[in-house]
């Protein structure tokens, strides 16, 4: 785990120092959402030593847990941006550091969020069973923290893992649980690491779940995926450019599964246009299923070519 404490720690810190770390984490997270982890992971890593140096200072008792939480979340952001950039081993290294500090702070909500993010790494790299294990650990932490929003995030991603495993009934049940938990959540005070999970993001996740059920279980699930994805695409603004591009890719896949080739090609091209502003290796990976499906259709030849042209640049 990441335990080293950089030299040069200040003798004593105050609230402004902690707020500076919290603000940095928010700003880097916003850059990641809009431009991808490749746009900011080096900046996050260069900022981390300064944040960790604060752990070696004399800290007022009232700030110790808040400081541990703030630095933990900086590691959380570092892990996510590295994951999005394709640096998996380093990402997991920073998530482990985040778990260490969040646990020390007693912040179960953040512990839950880190487990969610570790699970997403496994889910993206075709280890849905390992992802489920992380999501379950995160769900236990969310419930211990009495956070229904954190629980909703974990339940939604459990549904996604079930879909990738072809377990349709469990996936649909987990989506119902997600909806109930989200509707019960107190959204008046949401920590920055969970603020992404709005009604829009929940709808997008549902679309992603139905997309994988359509791919791995029954193509008829595409009819459920399409409305959710279309709503999410309309709702995502420019600040969530990566998420919108992901949804466009999934929507194009579903249109192909529904034999609507011309529409799929148009949407796929739109996804490529939106994706050009995003530095994300995950974007490249998400294009692979669209390319595979497009190759089955003679009317999608140009889209297949354009995807192959873009994929090396997507990282």
Image (cartoon, helix red, strand yellow):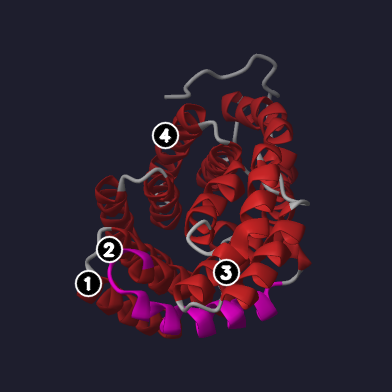
**Tags 1 and 3 touching, CB below 8 Å:** no
Q: Residue 185: x, y in percent? A: 45, 79
Q: Is residue 197 visible?
A: no
First in residue order: circle 1 vs circle 3: 1
**Mark toward the start of the polypeptide (4 vs 2):** 4
SS category of the residue bearing label 1? helix
Q: Report helix, strand or loop for mark 3.
A: helix
Q: CA distance from mark 1 to mark 4?
A: 29 Å
Name the side, left or right, on which 302 lies relative to 100.
right
Q: Specify the segment rendered in magenta.
A: 215-236
Q: Is residue 231 above or below residue 86?
A: below
Q: Position of residue 265 (x, y in %)?
A: 65, 68
Q: CA distance from mark 1 to mark 2?
A: 6 Å
- Give the number of the disc on residue 96: 4
Query: Label 4 neighbourhood size at 10 Å, few (<14), some (14-19), many (20+)?
Result: many
Q: Nearer the viewer, residue 146 or 40?
A: 40
Residue 105: quadrant of the picture: top left
Image location (x, y in percent) of residue 91 = 50, 34
Rendered image quadrant of residue 178 = bottom left
Quarter of the image for the C terminus: give it.
Answer: top right
Query: Which of 224 and 95 lies nearest the eye of the viewer?
Result: 224
Q: CA distance from mark 3 to mark 2?
A: 22 Å
* Residue 26 visible to an observer of this rendering: yes
Q: Which residue occupies 65% across, 14% down?
A: 7
- Mark 3 / mark 2, whichever is N-terminal: 2
Contact between marks 4 and 3 (CB within 8 A): the answer is no
User: In the rendered image, which residue does mark 1 sit on?
Assistant: 170
Q: Which mark is residue 162?
A: 2
- Which circle marks residue 252 in the picture? 3
């Amino acid at each position: 785990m990441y335990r080293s404490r950089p030299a040069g720690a200040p003798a004593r810190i105050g609230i402004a120092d902690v707020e500076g770390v919290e603000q940095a984490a928010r700003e880097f997270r916003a850059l990641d959402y809009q431009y991808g982890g490749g746009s900011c992971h080096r900046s996050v890593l260069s900022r981390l030593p300064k944040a960790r140096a604060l752990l070696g200072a004399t800290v007022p008792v009232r700030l110790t847990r808040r400081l541990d939480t703030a630095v933990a979340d900086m590691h959380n952001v570092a892990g996510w941006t590295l994951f999005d950039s394709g640096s998996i081993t380093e990402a997991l290294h920073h998530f482990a550091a985040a778990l260490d500090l969040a646990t020390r702070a007693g912040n179960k909500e953040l512990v839950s969020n880190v487990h969610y993010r570790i699970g997403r790494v496994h889910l993206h790299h075709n280890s849905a069973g390992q992802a489920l294990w992380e999501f379950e650990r995160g769900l236990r932490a969310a419930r211990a923290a009495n956070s229904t929003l954190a629980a909703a995030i974990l339940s939604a991603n459990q549904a996604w893992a079930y879909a990738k495993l072809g377990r349709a009934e469990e996936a649909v049940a987990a989506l119902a649980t997600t909806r109930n938990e989200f509707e019960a959540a107190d959204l008046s005070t949401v920590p920055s690491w969970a603020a992404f999970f709005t009604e829009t993001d929940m709808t997008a996740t549902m679309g992603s779940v139905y997309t994988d059920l359509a791919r791995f279980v029954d193509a008829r699930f595409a009819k459920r995926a399409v409305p959710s994805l279309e709503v999410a695409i309309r709702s995502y603004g420019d600040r969530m450019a990566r998420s919108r591009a992901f949804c466009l890719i999934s929507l194009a896949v579903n249109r192909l599964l529904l034999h609507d080739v011309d529409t799929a090609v148009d949407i796929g091209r739109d996804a490529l246009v939106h994706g050009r502003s995003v530095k994300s290796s995950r974007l490249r990976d998400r294009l692979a299923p669209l390319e595979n499906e497009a190759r089955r259709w003679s009317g999608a030849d140009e889209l297949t070519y354009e995807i192959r042209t873009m994929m090396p640049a997507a990282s």
